[in-house]
Amino acid sequence: MSRNIRWRGLAVTMAVVLLLAAFATMTTALAGLPASATNTVRESPALAAAPTPGQYYRMQVVRSGLHLEVAFASTDFAPIIQAPGAPNYRPSNWRFDAVDGGLYRIVNRNGGNCLRGGSASVRLVINQNTCNTSINDLHWTLTPTPPSSTDTFRVTNRTSGLSLCIIGNLTFAAVPLVSDLQGSCDQRIKLIPVS
């Protein structure tokens, strides 16, 4: 019995050590990024062009060049990931519906569901869910960011105050979209119009 408890204790200790090592590696990698690769650069005072009503866009993660899409092309509740996606691939097409006061609902073309933020938990995986204009979790602001203040933005959730980013600034496909504090990862999203 005591041998079994020791093994469990050792397994828990190893898991904690591995998590701490992963966090330290990610923190070290983030610390080594140049200022142009993070959101520590000063935002442009120029006004950005608002998304065109009814127009669909691909949301490109500037750091990876990949686009945000609904995992598995789901039309139900599903996480948002970065992927290569073709321009007219419906799960990677998004429309920005103005709500009020500079806020938007971000609607996916494939299922008509909205990008949903939510709690103020850092690194919360972002998903799509049914659209309802009265839910603040579905409302987002667009803040112009360099290199182009006309089509590149930091997308921030109204409820949490956290912005969209790819965890650990990873640059390969299928990595989930999360919300995080400003400056913790590259939060630049470029809007590319699609037909």
Image: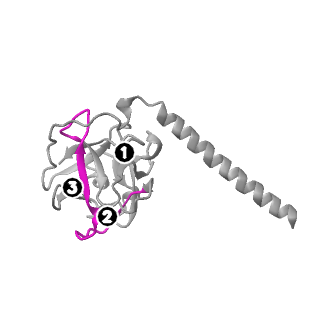
Sequence-wise, the earlier of marks 1 and 3 is 3
Asked whether, in this view, residue 103 is left or right of residue 31, the answer is: left
Disc 2 residue type (three-letter): Asp
Whether residues under marks 2 and 3 lie with C-beta atoms below 8 angstroms apart, the answer is: no
Image spot of residue 94 (x, y percent): 25, 54
Sequence-wise, the earlier of marks 2 and 3 is 3
Question: Circle 3 sits on which residue?
Answer: 95
Residue at (41%, 52%) from the top-left corner? Answer: 178
- In this view, the residue in front, 18 or 65, is 18
- In this view, the residue in front, 85 or 8, is 8
Callout 3 environment at 10 Å: few (<14), some (14 to 19), or many (20+)?
A: many
- In this view, the residue in front, 27 or 151, is 27
Image spot of residue 53 (x, y percent): 12, 55
Of labels 1 and 3, the one closer to you: 1
**111 shown above or below 62:** below
When asked about the image quadrant of residue 41, the answer is top left
Q: Is residue 26 magenta?
A: no
Asked whether, in this view, residue 138 is left or right of residue 118, the answer is: left
Q: Quadrant of the N terminus?
A: bottom right
Question: Circle 2 sits on which residue?
Answer: 137
Asked whether, in this view, residue 32 is left or right of residue 11, the answer is: left
Disc 1 residue type (three-letter): Gln
Callout 2 environment at 10 Å: few (<14), some (14 to 19), or many (20+)?
A: some
Q: In the drawing, what numbered circle is on residue 182?
A: 1
Find the distance from the CA under tag 1 to the CA under tag 2. 18 Å
Magenta span of residues: 125-152
* Colouring method of the image: one colour
Of labels 2 and 3, the one closer to you: 2
